[in-house]
Image: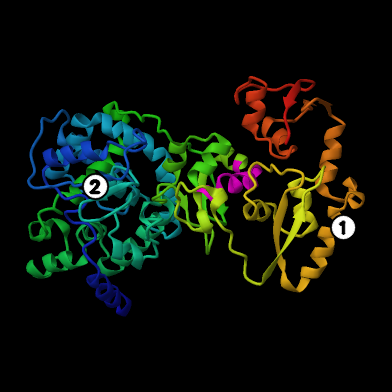
Amino acid sequence: MKRAFLIIAVLMLLPVNKNIFAFGTSNPDNYAASLDSMMNLWHSRPSVGELVVDTIIESAENLVEELPDSVYIARLAAINTPIQLTFNSQVKSYIKLYTQRRREQVEQMLGLSQYYFPIFEAELDAANLPHELKYLPVIESALNPRALSKAGASGIWQFMYYTGKKYGLEVNSYIDERRDPVKASKAAVAFLSDLYEIYGDWKLVIAAYNCGPGNVNKAIRRTGGKTDFWEIYYRLPRETRGYVPAYIAAVYTFNYSREHGLYPKAPQLPVATDTVMVYQPLHFKQISEITSIPLEVIRDLNPQYRLDVIPAKDKMYPLRLAFDHATLFASLEDTIYNHRRLELFPDNKLVAAPVEASSLPVVAPAGTEAIYYTVKSGDVVGLIADWFDVRTSDLQYWNNIKRNMIRVGQKLVIYVPKAKADHYRAVAQRHGSSAASVKPATTASAQSTSTLASSASASGEYVYYTVRSGDNIWAIAKKYQGVSPQDILNLNNISDATKIKPGQKLKIKPL
C-alpha cells in the first residue's frame, strides 16, 4: 500500500502521458482521419521522417452493422484474457471502423504486428502482465515507432519526454529511445505495472496510460469513489473516453481479422533479426556503403537514432539488422568503422559534417607519445599495426588511410605509451630498414597471405582466386587487404545473388 501511494505521488508529478497527444477521440470519424495520418507509415514510405500524430475523439456514432451484437459478445467472451472486454455501442463503433472503413490500414498493421508483437510479448511475459496489452500501440501509434504527437509524445508507445526519462529512456540530440521498440517496450511494461499497483483494474490502467493517473483519480473522486471505467466514463477527459473502447475493438479485430476477410500485408521488415553492439561512433552511411544494405532498411530497424548516427562514444549502443546482415556486419566490422571516418566524424566528434578529412588534425590519445615509421616496399597496414601493438583502425585513423592504401616512403605517425616509446622507436628502426623486414611466417596476417598464395596466382596487377568448397564472396574478400565484397562482384560482373562454384576463378585486385 505504501508503495502504491509512492507511485501515485511520483506519477502525479509527471506530465499527463498522452491524453490529447496521440489518441483522444470518442468519435470514430475523427479517429479515422487520424488513422489515415498514422498509417502513412515510414515502413511503407521510408523518406517520411518523423510522423506527427494528432488524434481527436469527441462523440460516438453508430455505423451500419452487419453482424448481430450476440456474435460480437460471444467472440469477445471467447478471448482468453484477464482484461474484461466489454461490448457496447462505443466498442461496436470502433469495431466497425476497423473492420469496414479502414481495412487497408488494418491489414498493414496486421503485417507490422508480425515484427513488433513478439517484442511486446517478450517484455509483457517477463513482467507477468497480460499479453493482450500488446494492442495498446495499435491505438497509440498505429505501430509506427517514429510517431510524434504535437504535444511531444514520441515512439511506438507514445511516451512524453519526462515520463520516458523516468522509466530509463535516453533522449538527447542523437538518440530517442522512446522510438526504440525494445527499450520503449520495457519502459511501457514498467509504467503499466506501476499503474496496476495503483488501480488493480486493467481498464483503469489503460485509461490512466492515456490521460495520466491524475485525471483518472479526479474522475473517481467526482463519482463518489466508483472504480468501474464505465461508471466514471463521463467524468474522464472527453479525449480519453474513446480510448478503452478503441482498445477493446483493436483486440477484437486482431483476433478475428480472418472472419472479416482481413489479411496481413507483408511488412518491409525482416522477421529474423539480430543485434550487434557498436563501440565507437558510427554513421549509417558507413554501414550502407560497405555492406550494400539500403540506408532506409537500416533506418527502419533502428528508428531511435535521430541523425543516422550511433553515438557510441562513452558506451556501447545496439544496432539491429536482419540476421544475415548482422553476420555480414561482423565479418566487415573493421572496414565499416574505418570507411569515411575522418570525413563523417572530424576531430573524432560525433557531429557528422562534410569536412575534407586530410585537413583535420588528430589529437594524440592521453598518455601517449608520437613516433614515426616510414613505409617500405612490401609493408601492409595490418603488419605495421602488429609491430607497434596498436589496432589497425587506430593506425588508419591517425594517418587518414583509406581502404588500407599506403605508399612507399610515406611517413606514418603512431601513438604509443610514453613508457615504451624508446622500445617502439627501436621497432620502427628495425622494421624500417630493408634488411630487417619481419618474416612473413611470424604473423597471422602473413600466414593468411601464404595460404592465399596456394590458391591464387598473380597476373600483372590482379590475382585470380580459385573458389573452394564452402567459400562465399564475403569470406574471400576478407582474405585480401583493401578488397570489399562489392569490388569482387564488380570486377567479375556478377551480382550478390550469383552462386559461386568450387573451381571457379575470380579476378581480384588487391591493394
Alpha carbon separation for disc pair 1 and 2: 74 Å
Residue most toward the bottom? Answer: 2
Q: Quadrant of residue 266?
A: top left
**Magenta highlight on residue 333:** yes
Answer left or right for 256 relative to 313. Answer: left
Nearer to the camera, 503 or 138: 503
Q: Which residue is mark 1?
A: 430
- Which region shows up in magenta? 329-343
How many residues crowd around disc 2 within 10 Å: few (fewer than 14), some, or many (20 or more)?
many
Residue at x 62%, y 70% (from the top left corner): 366
Kind of element beneath mark 1: helix
Q: Quadrant of residue 454?
A: top right
Residue at x 68%, y 30% (from the top left corner): 473
Question: Which amino acid type is marked by label 1?
Answer: Arg
**For the image shown, how many numbered marks are present on the structure?**
2
**Residue 189's x, y, as percent?**
37, 59
Q: Which mark, by number, is residue 473? A: none
Question: Which amino acid type is marked by label 2?
Answer: Tyr
Kind of element beneath mark 2: helix
**Residue 180's x, y, as percent?**
41, 52
Q: Is residue 319 visible?
A: no
Q: Quadrant of residue 480?
A: top right
Residue at x 20%, y 52% (from the top left corner): 150
